[in-house]
Image (cartoon, rainbow, N blue to C red):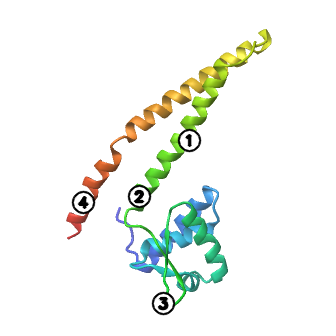
Amino acid sequence: MKSPQLSFEELKTNISNHMSLSFESEGFSPLVGKIFAQLLFASSPMSLQEIAENLGVTKAAISVQARTLEKHMMCHKLPTSSNRKDYYYISDDFSMTTIQIMIMKIGNIQKMIESTLNSFSNLAEVEESEQSSLYASKRRFLEMQALHEMLMARLEGLEEEWEVRREQIFLNLE
């Protein structure tokens, strides 16, 4: 069954609502998702005032949440000296940035796991009553280590593969 045709405005509204819920489920303000959606559809950097007017909220609210997006490397600020306004935009390759952030997070988890496993090796005498807990927790950390190693191995080379695929997408748009 074919979906009903949407106007471009309806599509943007649907995406904005989806992004709002998605970002909220990740612990962000729903406004962060709406700002992200605005920037996704923007053909050029947008000022805080433009975003605020489009979303019907204050410029101050947009400023706070735009900084949150910037802090998480999901958008960038483009300061201009001509009118003292800050403009925000999403990098051309925000998808790869998302993957790079994921790789960084996995790497940080790996460091914590490695540190914990080293701590297991340096434990003083463990009471008999704690042996089963020690065994269970050490096994779990070894499993986490193995899984994260597999994840990192699978992600290796992804950037290069993505560049090739991205070029194909651009060629198909022409």
Q: What residue type is labelled 2?
A: Ser
Secondary structure, mark 1, is helix
Residue beneath disc 3: 82
Pointers 3 and 4 in contact (CB under 8 A)?
A: no
Residue 15 vs residue 58, the one in the foreground: 58
Secondary structure, mark 3, is loop
Q: How far apart are marks 3 and 4 (CA)?
A: 35 Å
Residue 173, by quadrant, is bottom left
Mark number displayed over residue 167: 4
Q: Distance between the residues labelled 1 and 3?
A: 41 Å
Q: How far apart are marks 2 and 4 (CA)?
A: 14 Å
Q: Position of residue 156 (x, y in %)?
A: 36, 40
Q: Does label 4 or label 1 sit earlier along the sequence?
A: 1
Q: Does label 2 or label 1 sit earlier along the sequence?
A: 2
Q: Is the residue marked by circle 3 packed among few (<14), some (14-19), or many (20+) residues within 10 Å?
A: few
Q: Does label 1 or label 3 sit earlier along the sequence?
A: 3
Q: Does label 2 or label 4 sit earlier along the sequence?
A: 2
Residue beneath disc 2: 95
Residue drawn 31% across and 52% down? 162
Residue drawn 43% across and 77% down? 42
Q: What residue type is labelled 1?
A: Asn
Residue beneath disc 1: 108
Residue drawn 34% across and 65% down? 2
Q: Which amino acid does label 3 sit on?
A: Ser
Q: Distance between the residues labelled 4 and 1?
A: 31 Å
Which is closer to the viewer, label 3 or label 2? Answer: 3
Q: What residue type is labelled 4?
A: Glu
